Image (cartoon, grey):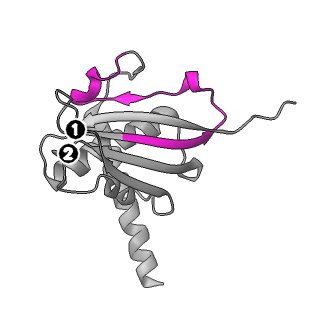
């Protein structure tokens, strides 16, 4: 029986926020992160770290807060701004997950949604998204995290 080799892979994703507001940045980031996790079968314990970037026109909130809201408490997260390249896509949020997995790079599903779908059509193999179902999943995750936080406060 051969042993599966675990390596660190980079899973990429990008989306756009509807506006430079805290709520829109967090909503867009949660949607993107949820799709990246669900499409690839990523478990939190297998994530080494995550890098979140925004274009300079998005500064109302740290996008990594969306990951914290979804329970990514023990994962190293960092936020930064993208280079301000003339003509680049505005209001863009990008995520790079460092994922420990046995999957080959060719099997990773990189997620580009909303206005960012045009950035990498060559590698985005995302099936149609049921946005209502995705939002329901996110709400379940947020509710579960709130219950965990309340239980920790009572200890």
Q: Which residue is mark 1?
A: 84
Of pointers 2 and 1, the one earlier in the residue sequence = 2
The x, y position of residue 85, in whole percent, is 22, 32
Q: Is residue 77 above or below residue 14?
A: below
Highlighted magenta segment, given as a residue range: 95-121
**Quadrant location of residue 2?**
top right
Q: Closer to us: mark 2 or mark 1?
A: 1
Q: Residue at x 38, y 43 (%)?
A: 33
2 and 1 marks in contact (CB < 8 Å)? yes
Q: Is residue 78 magenta?
A: no
Q: Which residue is mark 2?
A: 56
Q: Residue at x 50, y 51 (%)?
A: 49
Q: Is residue 23 above or below residue 84?
A: below
- Residue 146 relative to residue 87: left or right: right
**Quadrant location of residue 16?**
top left
- Residue 35 relative to residue 54: left or right: right
Which of the labelled discs sits on residue 8, or is there none? none
Q: Residue at x 43, y 40 (%)?
A: 96
């Amino acid at each position: 029986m051969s042993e599966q080799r675990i390596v660190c892979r980079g899973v990429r994703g990008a989306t756009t926020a509807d506006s430079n507001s805290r709520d829109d940045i967090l909503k867009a980031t949660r949607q993107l992160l949820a799709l990246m996790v669900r499409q690839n079968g990523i478990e939190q314990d297998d994530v080494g770290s995550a890098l979140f970037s925004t274009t300079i026109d998005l500064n109302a909130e740290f996008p990594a807060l969306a990951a914290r809201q979804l329970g990514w408490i023990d994962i190293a997260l960092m936020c930064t701004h993208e280079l301000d390249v003339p003509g680049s896509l505005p209001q863009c949020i990008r995520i790079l997950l460092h994922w420990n997995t046995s999957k080959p790079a060719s099997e990773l599903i990189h997620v580009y949604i909303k206005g960012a779908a045009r950035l990498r059509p060559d590698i985005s193999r995302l099936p149609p998204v049921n946005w209502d179902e995705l939002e329901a999943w996110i709400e379940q995750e947020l509710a579960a995290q709130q219950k965990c936080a309340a239980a920790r406060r009572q200890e």
